[in-house]
Image: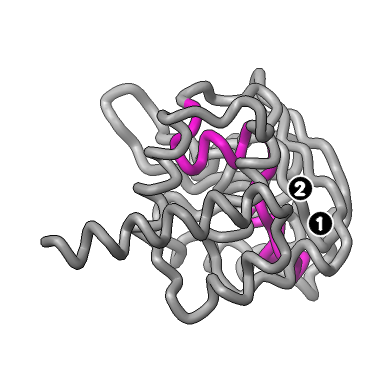
């Protein structure tokens, strides 16, 4: 069993994140002990409790995974859906350059909090309707605008919405998706889509 774990780690790409249950059906407690041994041997880096990395190295040391990459690894392990929310969604789409100390994601899986260095990854369980969107960007855009709040929307906000929708038109799904958004967000998206269309016709 030990060799199975070591072989999988050796075959993996640099930058791969491992969890103790990445090696099922091998017992997770046993796998955790082997991963700790590999850390002590310098093969892996412990990112947080129960989270290990086969590191890419730079002149400054190991390149650590982003909070989002860790969240995605956990979601994949849990076969769960995942969406950034609040300031995390704002940062993801460029509404805010502030990197949140507490990165919050909605998940269809198990809620949990994970301490990663000085930051915290919070996974909040959400209802199935949260993940009913057809597009990938539209639900994040809706969650980001909800976080910003209607009374804080200004020209800079609308410029970013324009850029997001121009870059990610999701033409086949956005009509259906905006029906799930609050009315004021629906209006912003429709008006921005119309503006993009007008500008494209003028080009």
The reply to whether the magenta stretch includes residue 79 is yes
Q: Position of residue 83 (x, y in %)?
A: 67, 54
Looking at the image, which residue is at 85% across and 56% down? 126
Mark 2 surroundings: few (<14), some (14-19) or many (≥20) residues within 10 A: few
Front residue of this view, candidates 32 and 130: 130
Looking at the image, which residue is at 70% across and 58% down? 181
Mark 1 surroundings: few (<14), some (14-19) or many (≥20) residues within 10 A: few
State how far apart marks 2 and 1 are (Cα): 5 Å
Front residue of this view, candidates 92 and 44: 92
Looking at the image, which residue is at 44% across and 50% down? 15
Q: Residue furthest bottom?
A: 172
Q: Are marks 2 and 1 in contact (CB under 8 Å)?
A: yes
Rendering colour mode: one colour
Magenta part, dominant SS:
helix
| Quadrant position of the N terminus in the picture | bottom right
Residue 12 seen in the current view: yes
Label 2 sits on residue: 33
Looking at the image, which residue is at 54% across and 71% down? 174
| Quadrant position of the C terminus in the picture | bottom left
Looking at the rendering, the stretch of residues picked out in magenta corresponds to: 72-96
Q: Position of residue 84 (x, y in %)?
A: 65, 47
Give me the disc on residue 30.
1
Front residue of this view, candidates 136 and 178: 178
Q: Residue furthest top?
A: 118
Q: Position of residue 68 (x, y in %)?
A: 57, 45
Residue 36 seen in the current view: no
The reply to whether the magenta stretch includes residue 126 is no
């Amino acid at each position: 069993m030990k060799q199975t774990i070591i072989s999988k780690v050796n075959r993996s790409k640099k930058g791969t994140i491992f969890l103790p249950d990445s090696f099922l059906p091998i017992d997770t407690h046993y796998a955790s002990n082997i991963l700790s041994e590999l850390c002590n041997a310098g093969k892996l880096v412990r990112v947080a409790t129960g989270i290990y990395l086969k590191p890419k190295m730079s002149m400054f040391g190991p390149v650590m995974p982003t909070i989002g990459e860790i969240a995605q690894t956990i979601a994949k392990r849990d076969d769960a859906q995942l969406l950034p929310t609040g300031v995390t969604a704002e940062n993801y789409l460029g509404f805010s350059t502030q990197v949140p100390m507490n990165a919050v994601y909605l998940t269809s899986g198990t809620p949990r909090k994970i301490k990663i260095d000085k930051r915290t990854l919070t996974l909040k369980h959400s209802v199935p309707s949260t993940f009913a969107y057809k597009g990938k960007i539209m639900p994040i855009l809706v969650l980001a605008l909800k976080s910003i709040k209607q009374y804080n929307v200004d020209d800079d906000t609308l410029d970013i919405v324009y850029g997001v929708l121009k870059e990610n038109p999701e033409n086949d799904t956005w009509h259906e998706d905006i029906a799930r958004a609050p009315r004021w967000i629906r209006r912003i998206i429709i008006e921005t889509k119309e503006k993009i269309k007008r500008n494209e016709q003028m080009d």
